[in-house]
Amino acid sequence: MTNPEQDKDQDSKKVIVVIVITILLGVNALLLWQFFDKKTHLEQVSRELDTTMAEKESLSAELQRVKTEYEKLNQENASLQNQLSAKDEEIRLKIAQIQKLIASGDAVQLKKAKEELAALKTLNQNYIAQVDSLKSVNKLLTDENVSLNQNLSSANTKVTSLTQENSFLANKVAIASVLKTANLRAFGVRYKSSGKETETTKAKSTDRIKTCFTITENLVVEKGPKDIFVRVLSPDGAVMSTSSETFVFNGQATLYTTKESIMYENRDTDLCVYWEKGNTYNTGKYTIELYCEGNQIGVATLELK
């Protein structure tokens, strides 16, 4: 038979156990709640940290892209640095400032970095626009310079061509302006007691050397007085002359035998020139040369036996 006191004692113990279990369950529940709350908080903090890191990496990447774009532009347009040096320094300072803000990792600094980066992008775009504008101006100037050089080259070519043509025409005019002779003939003459002259080929019978020719028509030559210089060369090649008078030929003073002055009217003009030695002629071949205005206009030979 069970003792009532013992039963009562056992019931009390059961109540205590239940209470302890209940307390333990409550404590466990509280601990679990705290655990899950802390876990949720840690996960939130982790997510925020991940977001901050992602934003930091994104800002760093975007800054690097802007910096790379700027440096590339800088390299491509080194010739324009003098014109854009002030803007260049401003951009460099902005890049350094943003790098410091990103390096801090602070959310406030990252926000400021984002704002500064946006301003830098605008500044960089303006820089690019200025460079493009200068490049356009330079290209325009280069194209104009090329065009001017081409025009100048074309003009120089034309001038050269015209100069050559003028030189050619001037040469033709100069050649055309030279008097020419026709029917040139030289022979010895002797005089009879009656004064009549007859031709002769005998040296001892020759009193004079006579040279006859026609100065042909030339409408290019200027009308007016003309001096015809005659050079008679003896068989040994010496100029036969009784004076020391000269004319200019090929830039040099040249001794002549005799001179005949005429009035040229641009038409055929017949002329005969005499020269008398004053003593007996030697046998051999004589050469008679005619000159006018610095040009040789005829050559004839005479054989005296």
Image (cartoon, helix red, strand yellow):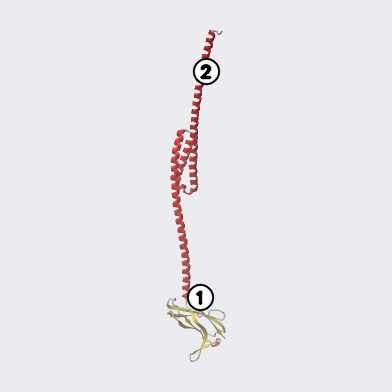
Residue 109 versus residue 186 in the image, above or below = above
- Which residue is drawn at the image coordinates 49% and 32% (left, top)? 47
Label 2 crowd bin: few (<14), some (14–19), many (20+), radius 10 Å: few
Helix, strand or loop status at disc 1: strand
Q: Nearer the viewer, mark 1 or mark 2?
A: 2
Which of the marked residues, 1 or 2, is nearer the chain's N terminus? 2
Q: CA distance from mark 1 to mark 2?
A: 153 Å
- Which residue is drawn at the image coordinates 49% and 81% (left, top)? 182
Residue 296 versus residue 69 in the image, above or below = below
Task: Give the residue at mark 1.
Answer: 254
Residue 25 versus residue 230 in the image, above or below = above
User: What amino acid type is highlighted by mark number 2?
Assistant: Ile
Q: Position of residue 193 (x, y in %)?
A: 49, 91
Task: Give the residue at mark 2.
Answer: 21
Looking at this view, is 67 or 283 the one in front? 67
Label 1 crowd bin: few (<14), some (14–19), many (20+), radius 10 Å: some
Looking at this view, is 105 or 282 the one in front? 105
Query: What is the number of callouts on the image?
Result: 2
Q: Position of residue 262 (x, y in %)?
A: 44, 80
User: What amino acid type is highlighted by mark number 1?
Assistant: Thr
Q: Position of residue 165 (x, y in %)?
A: 47, 69
Looking at this view, is 117 or 199 the one in front? 117
The quadrant the N terminus occupies is top right
Q: Position of residue 162 (x, y in %)?
A: 46, 67
Helix, strand or loop status at disc 2: helix
Is there CB contact under 8 Å for labels 1 and 2? no
Residue 35 versus residue 94 in the image, above or below = above
